[in-house]
Amino acid sequence: MTKRGFPLHLTMEWLQIGYKSGALTPEDVMLEIIRRAEADSDMNVWITPPSMAVLKPYLERLIEMDPANAPLWGIPFAIKDNIDVAGIPTTAGCSEFAYTPVEHAAVVERLVAAGAIPLGKTNLDQFATGLVGTRSPYGEAHNALRPELISGGSSSGSAVAAARGHAVFSLGTDTAGSGRVPAALNELVGYKPSLGSWPVKGVVPACASLDCVTVFAHSLEEALIVDGIARGIHENDPWSRDVKKQQPKLPAKLCLPKQAVAFFGPFAEQYERAWHAAIGRLEQLNLPIEYVDYDLFSDAAAILYGGPWVAERWADLSGFIDSNPGVAFPVTERILRSGAAAEHDAASVFSAMHKLQAYKLEARKLLQDAVLVMPTCGGTWTREQVRKEPYSTNSDMGRYTNHCNLLDLCAVAVPSDAAEERLPFGITLFALAENEHLMNEAARSFLSGGERAAAAVPVESTRSVSARTGFAAEDIALEANTVEPSITVAVCGLHMRGYPLEKQMIGLNARFMREASSAPRYKLVKLPTTPAKPGMIKQLQGGASIELELWEMSPASFGIFTSLIPAPLGIGKVELLDGTEVSGFVCEAYAAAEAEDITAYGGWRRIPQS
């Protein structure tokens, strides 16, 4: 691979291939991203845009990092400006509120430790209050495909940054749908993990009891790679909890609303047609479909802004708003002050909590082994239309999103067939907090069952972009991460459970399958590296059976994984004891000359530890 044009959409796989081949350096990528951000400056994507002055320490840090231990080495990401990045002001969309943190938010810290590069801070609906992307004194974030349309909020800039190729992925937040609506409007995957599974330490609260950090990406697989690194209990986060990942599994059924779904705005007819097309795709998945009463979810959603939870926003921001009258965006201040209404007294809080608890029980019974599917949003508008009707349009955007966190559900928004040219349409899949594995498999099935790649860029669209921008067609083709069956990988050393590089497997969202053994045709050597590691060399005659572990990972993760492996190791076909072959670690024969022969031990775990 030689240095050449960048694809419109940056992906982990494309960058890792470029880094491994030497055709790209992280500095090359940062310079291109800065160029793109400057070219799109009138789209109001960034509050603190990427600059080499800010990025230089992270680039220098990469020199000291071993890519084999850093699954996100050199991967650039954008951060919504209500999430802390050390040394960069956090504004929450209000310059008078701004402060400069001395440490990263917990999720940012985990991503940086994995080698990712934080680019800067993106625009948002002020104080994460809104679903439209127009409520910012830093300007209205333009839609990535049609600038006259809204981008969706509140994570507006984060979605547009990923969609416009300013970042490989981006972080948003989600209280009422802010990690999902912008994904649908900008043709992205928006992954909202279960409450507490990602820490929220270092995030400006909107409704602290409901807030989630989320990720926007061009494919489900890359979103899940980020999820694998970001999730996990944080000892200093009171909202953090252990939501364990389970083995992938399809749900027993899909739940669709038995009521007619309402659509709204100037594109209501196009959205309705796209919804029925999505139902058609769902019907082709060979999963049972049950039509359920959606009133449960709409009634729960009504509690969010029609009940005392608006007071939770006010509890966090009342001191600032009262001390700085007129500073906040007018629409935002009015919404925040509604939380101070006398009707939201202590009795109303408990009354709403008790009502919500009953809704949670109903939802748990309904979705025990099932996934709910709804449109992500039922329409969209031009930015001018939202400016004229800021309240009703925002309310409509949350019709199919607001229930999610109140009912303790996880969600993933994925693209479906477009409503019309450059007018994306998407669906959201919901599941109980502990059932992310059901939701993810259903989403994979939907994406792979259709005629589009998971990267959400149609082939025809890609060709036209290539002609317009001059990007090399063969480069752009690399980003089309078509969903394929998972790849089984045999590991024999430091990537096994309990060893230092297990974290790389987890970071790449790999899943341990089982212990296994190779065919009795391998020599095992101990390579003179630091740390020491094994090498398996297949023999024409003789050899022994070597203990292995079999892991499963997505094609996107596998591409990144293979790019991180240093010589003399590589990935080839490993013959198992039952005669089947899987992808796995192999070693070039020349390495045996200076390596210790440890074949007699039969496996890395059997070697005496010094």
Image (cartoon, rainbow, N blue to C red):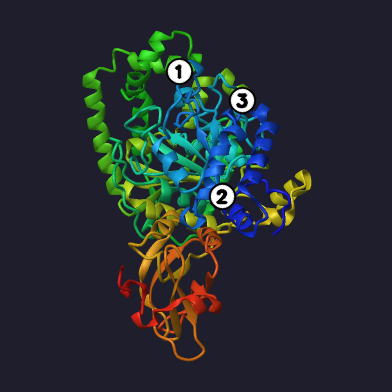
> For this view, does 109 lie left or right of residue 281?
left
> Residue under circle 2?
277
Q: Is residue 492 above or below residue 122?
A: below
Taking the spot 66% from the left edge, 29% from the top edge, the residue there is 41
State the residue position of label 3: 383
Label 2 secondary element:
helix
Quote the CA–CA distance across marks 3 and 2. Answer: 27 Å
Residue 235 place in picture, x, y as percent:
28, 40
Q: CB of mark 3 within 8 Å of CB of mark 1? A: no
User: Quarter of the image holding residue 40?
Assistant: top right
Residue at left offset 58%, top offset 20% = 387
- Is residue 169 visible in the rendered image? The answer is no
Task: Tell which circle, 2 or 1, labels the residue nearer the N-terminal end.
Answer: 1
Query: What crowding class fits label 3: few (fewer than 14 Cα within 10 Å), some (14-19), or many (20 or more)?
Result: many
Q: Residue at x 46, y 55 (%)?
A: 69
- In front: 351, or 337? 337
Mark 3 residue type: Arg
Question: CA–CA distance between discs 2 and 1?
Answer: 45 Å
User: Which dot, 2 or 1, sits closer to the camera?
Assistant: 1
Percent from the top left, x then y, of residue 451? 60, 57
Q: Amino acid at mark 1?
A: Phe
Q: Residue furthest bottom?
A: 541
- Mark with earlier residue (3, 2): 2
Q: Which mark is residue 354?
A: none
Q: Nearer the viewer, residue 511 or 594?
A: 594
Question: Which residue matches tag 1?
Answer: 97
**3 and 2 marks in contact (CB < 8 Å):** no
Residue type at tag 2:
Ala
Q: Residues within 10 Å of mark 1 (few under 14, many from 20)?
A: some
